Image (spheres, coloured by chain):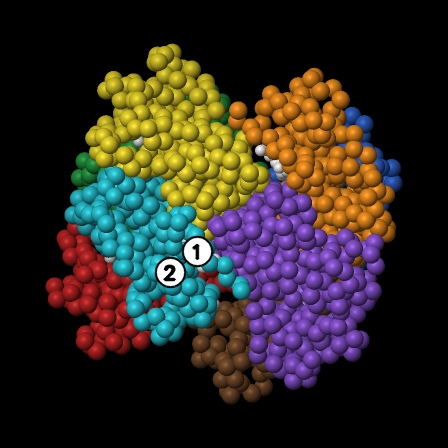
Chain colours: A green, B red, C blue, D brown, E orange, F purple, G yellow, H cyan
C-alpha cells in the first residue's frame, strides 16, 4: 500500500528504479526487490546493512552483497562497449563511496577502472596513473578532507569529471562540507558535483554520459 | 609579469583559457585577450561590466558584449554538429545566469536552445516544452529560490542535467544556498551541480558531454 | 509539582493539550495522561517510544499505539463533517512524519486521506492523484531531501498547503535544512511551513483550517 | 519572448499571477502588467521601487503605489464578506512587511484590520487588542528580532496564525534568521511560517483560508 | 601532575573552583574534590553521571547527588540573607538545566524559588506567578525551543534576568541555536545570556548579583 | 497611529522607553521624542545618524548628539551614588560600541569610568588598570576579533561582567560571530553576554545591577 | 591493492608517512605498519583505539600505545638537539589533543616540555610558567571552549605559536568552532592555526620549525 | 587619550606594533605613526585606503604607499640574511593579499621571492617554480576559491607553509569560507593557517620562522 514502485522508469529513463535502503526495513526492501526481480530487471539496493542484506538474500540467494560499498545487487547486464568509467579516489578512507560508485556503474552495465589512494599530497601517484584516467569517457572523482583532487585532475584531463565529496575527516571538515565547498569552487573547468558521499549519483551521471559517448556504436 | 597565461590549455583540454573578469582591471583584461587573440583562439571573458567591456572594445572592435550575460566574446567557431544543449530556466530573474551559459556554449562552438521561464509552479509550461529538452544531448537547468526544476526535469528526461543554482531570492534563500542544497539533494538521478550563479561552468561541462556524444561524427 | 497541565486549553483553544513525549519518563507521561483522561478529553502523546507506551498501556489499556507515527492516543471523537485533510508525502522514508500528522488529525476528529510516495521525480504518480488532493479542504505535504513537492503541488491546487520538511536524506541535506529552505522559498503561493519533522504541528494547523471551512455546517 | 505569463492561473487558482518586481526592469514590469490589465484582472506588483513605479504609472495612471509596502496595485475587487484578516506586528520597524501583507489581502478582495506595534516586551498592548485579533478568521503575525509574538499570540487565540519573520535587527539576528528559527520552533500550536520578510506570501495564505471560512456564504 | 587546582580562587573571587565533570574520570574527580574538601570549602561538581558519582560517594559519603541536575555537591554554607533568586523555566523538558542552576545557587549559599513550566504558550501560568518573580533580586530564566520566555518576562519585571537557552527541541532548533539567538535578540531590556544549557553559569552570575544587592547587610 | 509608546514603562521598570533609531525616519523619531520629552522624562535615541539628529535638534536644541556613539540624548538625571560602571574595551576599533554603552549609563544616571584599548595581546595594559575595574560594581567589557578580554578579566575580578562582542574584524570573524561565540563559551565564571554591538543593552543591564548594589543607600 | 604507501616521503620530506588510524581496520593498519617497519622507519599511528592497538601489538610487541593520546608508536630516533617544543594547554579536558602533539614530536625525534592546565581564567598559572615557554623554539598551544590562550600567550612571547582548537565544550561551542574562530581572529601576531583537535598537525609543523632553528647545529 | 600604543612591544617581541588601518581615521593613524616614527622604529600601516594614505604622507613624505597591498610603510631595515620567504599565490585575483604579505616581510627586514599565478588547475606552472619555493626557509601560500594550492605544495616541499585563504570567489565560496576550510583540512603535513585575507599575519609568522632559521648566523 505505502509504496508506489515506478515500473515505467525503465522505459522512461532506460534504467529501472534503484532502491535507497536507508530507513527501510528488510521486509520493505524484500517486497520491493521481488517486485522488480519479477520483471527480470537488474536490481540495485544501496545503503543496506549486512543484517538486512542477509534477510533479503534468504529469499533471493542470487543477490550479491558488497560489504565495503554496502550494496546488494543482481544483474545479468554485460558491458556493451569497451569504454570505461574511471573511479578515482584520494585516500583509503574514501573507499566505501568509491565502491558504491563502482558497483552502481557495473550493475548498470558499464566497465569501470579503479584508481585509488592517489590524493594530491603525493602527486606522483596521480601522475603515474593519469593516462588511464585520461582514456576514460568520464571520471568519478572521490575525495574527502579538503577535496582538492578534482581541481588537480580537472587541469590534467579533457573529459568530464563528476566530483563526489566524502564525509571523511574531522573538525573543520564539518561532515564533508569542506570537500563539498572545494569542489563547487573548483578553479578547473569540467567538474560538476553531487551530494556528499553520493557515490551512486556520481556513477549514474557517469553512466548517462558514457551512454551518450557510445550511442553511435549500439 | 603577474599573469601566467596557460597557452597550452587548448592543446591539453581542447579549449583556450576563459578569462574571469571579476576583480581584474580593464587594462589587465585587455593584455590577456590580446595575447589570446594573437593566436587566433576564440576568446571569452565572463563577469565583465559594460564599462570595462567598452574600454576593451576600443582596441578589439570585433568583440561582442552581451549585457544580460555580462560576457565579452569573439569567435569564428561554427557548430560542427546538429546536436544542441538545452538551456532551461525557471524564472525571468534567472536570465543572466542562463545567458552566461548560452554565450559560453555558443562561443565554444555548440548550438543551444533556450527554454526560459518554465518554473515548477506552472508545470504546464515545462510539459509543453519537454520534447525539445528531451532531444538535447544534455541540459543546463538554471533555477533560484527553491531550485526544484532539475528534480522535476530529471524525472522526465533521460539525458544528463547540469543544474545551476542562482542567487535569486531573499530571506531564507541565503544568496542561493537554498537552491544549491535542493539540487545537491535531488531525488532524481542524472543531476549534477555547479557553483551558485556559475552559468559558465555548467555550459563548459555540457560542451564536454556534447563533444563525447558526437565524437563518432567528427 | 513540576508539571502545570493547561486544563483550560480546551475551552480557550477548542482542543486539549497534546503531550510531547520526548524527554519525559513513562511515569511522567502516565501522570499527565491520567489527569487528562479523568476529564474525558481525547488524549494524544507524540514522540513516545514503544517501551514507554507499553508501560502507559498497562494502566490505560484503551490507548492505541502507532509504531510508525510513534504516537499513543485515545479518543471517542467522531468526524463531524465529510470534509477531509489530504496527507501527501514524497517517499516511503517520510512515512513516520506523515503518519504523525494523520494520527493527530484523526484524534482531533477530522477525516484524512493518505496519498503517499508521490515525489516529484515520478510526476505521473502525483498527477494521478491530484483530484483527491484538490478536493481536500487543506493539504499537509511532507517531503525530505530537496523538498520540492509543495512547490509543484502549490501550482496545481487552490487550497492551502501546510508543508513539512523531513530530516530524511544525508550529506548536504543537513538533517532537513535543505527541505526546510526549499519550502520557505517556494515559488508557489499558498504554501506555509512548519518545523522539520513536525507532522503534529502541520496537522494541528490543518485541523484549525478545516474547522473554519466547516463552521457554517456545525 | 523571455516571459511566459501564466494566464490560466486565475482559473486554476482563483487569483491572477502576482508580479515580483525585484530584479525586473520598469519596462519588463510594464509589459507584464499591461498584458494582465488587458484581461481586466486585478494587478499587484510587489518589491517595486518608487522610481520604477513612476514609470509604470505614466502608462497606467489608475495604479496606486504604496511607499511603505513598496507595492503597485490596481483592483476593482470589493470585499464580499464581513470577515477579516488581522495583520499584527511587533514593532514600528516591521511596518513595511506588515503593509505588504495588508495591501496583498486588500487587492485580493479581503478586509484587513491592522494591529501594529504590540510586541511582547510591552504585553499590555497585545492584551488590549486581543479581542479584535480573536475575531479575525486568520491572523498574519509579523515580527523581527527574537520573533516571539506568534508564540504568545498562539496561546491566546483559536484561529490559525501565519507567522512572518522580518529581517529587522542586527548582530546575532543574522538578517532574520533569529526570528525565523523562533517561529519554526514555536511551542504554541496553530502557527505556520513563511519566508523572512514575505508579507505577500503570508497574506496570500490568509486569503485562501478566509475564502474557505466563507465558502458557505458565497 | 596534570591538574593545577586554583586554590586561591576563593580569596580572589569569593567562591572555590567548581569542577566541570564532563570528560573527567571518576578517579580524576575524586582527587580534585578530596583536595578541595581538605580545605573545608564547599564543593560542587557539575555534569557528572550517576555512575561516576557513586564511585566518588564511596569515599565521600557526605556528598549529595542530584539526578536531574547531574550534580554532586557538599556544602555547610547557610543562606545569609532572605533575598532569593527566581529560577523560572518554560517547560518540563528544561528541568535538568533549571535544576543545575538551582543546585549551584544553593551550594553557593543563596536561596532559590523554583517557578517551573510557565512557558509563553499558556501565559496565565506566568502571570499567576509574576509577583514572586518580581520580588527576587535577580531571575534565571530557562527556555528551549523558541526561547521567548525572557522577552516576555523582561517586559514585566524590573530586576535583571540571566537567560539560559536550552537544547530542548528538534529540527530547526539546531540543538539550542534557535533559543540562543532569540535571547540575544530580545527586544526587552535587562536580559543577558549565557551558553546553551549552562545552568551553572547563569546561577553563578545571579549569585554575584545577589551578593551585590545584599552587600550592605553583611 | 502606527506607534504605541509605552509610557507606563517608567513606572513598571524604572526607566522610560529608549528609542531605537535604526530604520525610523527623522520625523518618526521627532514625534516620539517630543511625546517623551513632554513628560519630562530623560530621552535616549540610539543608532541615529548625524543627518537625522540634526533634524531633531532643530526642534529640540537641548539634545546632545555623540558622533562616536551615534546617540542623541537629553537628561537632567544626576548620579545618586558614588558607585560606577567600568566600561572596558579591547581596541580602538571597538570605541563606538563602548561609547554607546557609556552614554546609555550616563543618561540613566550612573557614573562610568572608561578603560579603553586594553586588549589581551598587550596584557600589561589591562593589569595596570585592574584595580579601577575591580572597584566598579559591575563591568561592561567590549571586544571584537577573538573576544578574549572578558575571559581574562573574569579570572581577575569578583564582580559581574556584561560582555559585548563587536563586529570589528574581517574574514573568519563573520561580523562578530567569532567574538560572540568566545564570550558565550568563556571558561571564566561571572560573564554574561548581550547581542553583537549592543552597547546599549549591556549598559542597561549594568545599570540594573548598579541599582541593586546601591538600593540600601537610597 | 587499495593502499599506495608513500615510501619516498621520507626522502622527499624528511619524515616517513604517519598513519591516520580512524576508519581503518586493525588488519589494514597492521599491513601498513609492517611495511613501514620493514624499512626500519619510525612508525606513528594516530587516532587508534585500544582494541585495534592490541591486535597490532600482538604482531609488533615493540610498539607503544598511549591511551590518552590514542597513538601507537615505535621509534629509535633520539633527540639531536637540546632545543624543545613547548606543549601548552588550557584545561585538563584538552589533554588528549595535547598528548597527541607530544607523542608526535617525540616520535619525530624532538624534545617536548608539557605545560598543562594553564587556561586564561587563572592567569597566574600561565605567568608562573612563561619563561619555560619563552625558551622553547616554538610552542603548540591547545585550547577548547573560547580558545583565548594563544592570544594571551602571543602577547607574551616572541617565538611562533601553532594554535590547536579543541572540540572541548558544549552548546555554542559547536564542536570546536568557537575556539577555531577565536584563534583565526587572534589579535596577537605570530599565531597560526591547524584543524580542530589536530594535535598531530600542530606538532608536525612545530617539528619542521624546530629543524630550521637547529639546522646550523647538525 | 583613547589609544594606548604598545611601545615596549619591540623589546618584548622584537618588532614594533603594526597599525591596522581599517576603521581608524587618517588623523588617528597620523598620531599613531608619528609617535612610532619618533622612536625611529620601522612603521607599517595595513588596510589603509589611498585617501587616508595621502593625508598621512603630507606630514610624513618618506612613507611609501603600495596601492595593491593597501599598505603605508617606512623602514630603514636591510635584510641581514640571504634567506628568503617564498610568497606563492594561485591566481591574479589573490594579488592584493599576496602583496600585503610581501610588504610586511620586507618592512620587517626579510627578503621575499614572488611566485604568482601558479594555481593547481595548471599544475605545470607550479612544478616549473618548485625549486625556488623549496629553497625558501618558509613559504606563504595564498589561494582563494577551493584553496587547494597549499595541499599540493605541502606534498612537494619540506619546509613549513603558512596558508592564507582569500575571499576571492563567489556563490558557495561564502567569502573565503571554502578556501579556509580546505586549508584547515589539508591532507598534507606542514601547513598551518591564518585568517581569510590575512596576508599580514602570514608574513609575520614567516618572519618569526625565518629569524629562527638564521639565529645562528647573527
Ligand atoms: N511532536 C510535537 N512537536 C512539537 N510540539 C508538540 C509535539 N507534540 C506536542 N507538542 C506541543 O507541546 C506542548 C506540550 O509540551 P509539554 O508541556 O513539554 O508536554 C503542547 O502545547 C503541544 O502543543
Ligand atoms: N556546567 C558548567 N558549565 C560551564 N563551566 C563550568 C561548569 N561547571 C564548572 N565550570 C567551570 O569550569 C571550570 C573548571 O574547569 P576544569 O579545570 O576543567 O575543572 C571552573 O572554573 C568552573 O567555573
Ligand atoms: N541599540 C539598541 N539595541 C537593542 N535594543 C534597543 C536599542 N536601542 C533601543 N532598544 C530597545 O528597543 C525598544 C524600542 O524599539 P522601538 O519600538 O522599535 O523603538 C526599546 O524597548 C529599547 O529597549
Ligand atoms: N592586516 C591585519 N590583520 C590582522 N591584524 C593586524 C593587521 N594589521 C595589524 N594587525 C595587528 O593589529 C594590532 C593593532 O591593532 P590596533 O590597536 O587596532 O591598531 C597589532 O598588534 C597588529 O599585530
Ligand atoms: Mg594514503
Ligand atoms: Mg514567471
Ligand atoms: Mg519511492
Ligand atoms: Mg515600540
Ligand atoms: Mg507543558
Ligand atoms: Mg591597539
Ligand atoms: Mg582547570
Ligand atoms: Mg590565471
Which quadrant would residue E23 be assigned to in this image? Answer: top right
| Relative image position of residue H86 (x, y in whole percent) | 24, 49
| Relative image position of residue B208 (x, y in whole percent) | 25, 52
* Side of A99 where A23 appears, left or right: right
Residue at the outermost right position = C39
Q: Which mark is residue G85?
A: none
Kindly identify which chain the residue marked by label 2 belongs to.
Answer: H
Q: Is residue F94 above or below residue E170?
A: below
Q: What residue would you read off at disc 2?
A: H39
Establish whether ligand 10 lies closer than 8 Å to the Cβ of label 1.
Answer: no
Question: Which quadrant: the C terminus of chain E?
Answer: top right
Which quadrant would residue C153 be assigned to in this image? Answer: bottom right
Q: What residue would you read off at disc 1?
A: H7
* Side of F81 where F104 appears, left or right: left
Q: Is residue D114 above or below residue C140?
A: below
Front-most of residues A157 and D75: A157
What whole-number distance in Å separates the C-alpha atoms at marks 1 and 2? 9 Å
What secondary structure is found at the residue carrying circle 1? loop
Q: Residues within 10 Å of mark 1 (few under 14, many from 20)?
A: some
What secondary structure is found at the residue carrying circle 2? loop
Ligand 3 image-quadrant field: bottom right
| Relative image position of residue B10 (x, y in whole percent) | 16, 55
Which quadrant would residue D191 be assigned to in this image? Answer: bottom right
Give me the residue at 62% from left, 82% from top.
F55
Kindly identify which chain the residue marked by label 1 belongs to.
Answer: H
The number of numbered badges drawn on the structure is 2
Amino acid at each position: 500500500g505505502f509504496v508506489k514502485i515506478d515500473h515505467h522508469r525503465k522505459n522512461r529513463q532506460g534504467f529501472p528504479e534503484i532502491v535507497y535502503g536507508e530507513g527501510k526495513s528488510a521486509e520493505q526492501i524484500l517486497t520491493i526487490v521481488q517486485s522488480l526481480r519479477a520483471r527480470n530487471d537488474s536490481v540495485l539496493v544501496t545503503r543496506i546493512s549486512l543484517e538486512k542484506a542477509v534477510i533479503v538474500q534468504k529469499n533471493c540467494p542470487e543477490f550479491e552483497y558488497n560489504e565495503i560499498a554496502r550494496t546488494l545487487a543482481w544483474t545479468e547486464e554485460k558491458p556493451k562497449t569497451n569504454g570505461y568509467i574511471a573511479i578515482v579516489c584520494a585516500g583509503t578512507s574514501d573507499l566505501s563511496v568509491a565502491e558504491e560508485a563502482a558497483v552502481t556503474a557495473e550493475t548498470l552495465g558499464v566497465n569501470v577502472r579503479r584508481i585509488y589512494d592517489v590524493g594530491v599530497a603525493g602527486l606522483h601517484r596521480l601522475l603515474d596513473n593519469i593516462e588511464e584516467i585520461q582514456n576514460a569517457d568520464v571520471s568519478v572523482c572521490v575525495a574527502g578532507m579538503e577535496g582538492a583532487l578534482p581541481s588537480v585532475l580537472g587541469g590534467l584531463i579533457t573529459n568530464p569529471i563528476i566530483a563526489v565529496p566524502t564525509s571523511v575527516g574531522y573538525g573543520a571538515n564539518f561532515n564533508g562540507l569542506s570537500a563539498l565547498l572545494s569542489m563547487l569552487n573548483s578553479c578547473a573547468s569540467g567538474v560538476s558535483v553531487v551530494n556528499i558521499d553520493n557515490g551512486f549519483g556520481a556513477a549514474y551521471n557517469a553512466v548517462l554520459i558514457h551512454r551518450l559517448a557510445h550511442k553511435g556504436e549500439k
